[in-house]
Image (spheres, rainbow, N blue to C red):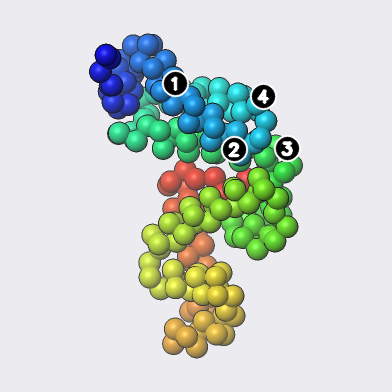
Amino acid sequence: MELLIEDSVLVRNYMKGDEKALEKLINRHNQRLSSFIYSKVQDRETTEDIFQDTFIKVIRTLKKGNYNEEGKFLPWVMRISHNLIIDYFRKNSRMPKFEGNNDYNIFSIISDDNLNAERQLIKDQIDLDLNVLIKELPKDQMDVLEMRLYKDMSFKEISENTGVSINTALGRMRYALINLRKIVEKHNIILTN
C-alpha cells in the first residue's frame, strides 16, 4: 500500500525537479477539479481546456517559485480554475459587461436581476469574495458601504444614522471604494475586467 504523500510535500518535490510529483498531484485532484469546472461550464471540451490552462498556470507559478499557499494546494488550484472560468464567460460575452473607464464600479453586477445559471454561480462567488473583502475595511468605511449597498440607504439616511455630515459619509464611501480596490489587488481577485 502506497503511503499518501501530502500535497505540500509533492509541491516541494516538484519545485525541486521531481516531475512525477506534479503528475501525482494532477491525478489526485483530477476528478474534483474537472467536476468543479464542468459544473460551471457544462461542456466537456471547455472543461478540458480550462483544466489544462489551470495546470499550465500552476506549473508556471511553481517553476517561478511563486507558490506560497503552504498546505492549501487544492483551494489555490480551484481559485485559478475559478478565475479562468470567469475569463471564459467574459470572452464569450456571457458575463455582464461593465461600462465606464478605469473607475469601474465593482458592484455593478450585484444589482443585475437577469442572471442566467452561469452568471449566478459567478455572482454568488463574487458576493462571497466581496463580503470577506469588505470586512477588511476600517469600521466607519465598512458601515457606510454596507448601508449604501445592502440596505440601499441614501447618503442623507447614512448621515442621519451615523451622526456625520453627508460630505463625511460621501468621503467614507469614496475611501471605502479606494481601499476595496487595493484589497482586491492585494488578494489578486478578479471581480471585473
Q: Residues within 10 Å of mark 2 (few under 14, many from 20)?
A: few
Q: Which mark is residue 45?
A: 4
Q: CA distance from mark 1 to mark 2?
A: 19 Å
Q: Amino acid at mark 4?
A: Glu
Dot 1 falls on a residue whose secondary structure is: helix
Which of label 2 and label 4 is nearer to you?
2
> Which is more N-terminal, label 2 or label 1?
1
Position above or below: 192 against 163: above
In the drawing, does residue 30 fall left or right of residue 85?
A: left
Q: Residue at x 56, y 53 (%)?
A: 124
Q: Residues within 10 Å of mark 4 (few under 14, many from 20)?
A: few
Q: Nearer the viewer, residue 189 or 27?
A: 27
Q: Amino acid at mark 2?
A: Ser
Number of on-image labels: 4
Q: Amino acid at mark 1?
A: Ile
Q: Quarter-wise, where is residue 151 in the image?
A: bottom right
Specify the farthest residue to the front. Answer: 1
Q: Which mark is residue 26?
A: 1
Q: CA distance from mark 3 to mark 1?
A: 27 Å
Q: Which mark is residue 92?
A: 3
Residue 98 in percent (x, y) is at 69, 52
Which of label 4 and label 3 is nearer to you?
4
Which of label 3 and label 2 is nearer to you?
2
Q: Quarter-wise, where is residue 148 in the image?
A: bottom right
Q: Residue at x 55, y 70 (%)?
A: 150
Position above or below: 88 against 144: above
Dots 2 and 4: beta carbons under 8 Å?
Answer: no
Position above or below: 155 against 57: below
> Which is more N-terminal, label 3 or label 4?
4
Q: CA distance from mark 2 to mark 4?
A: 13 Å
> Which is more N-terminal, label 1 or label 3?
1
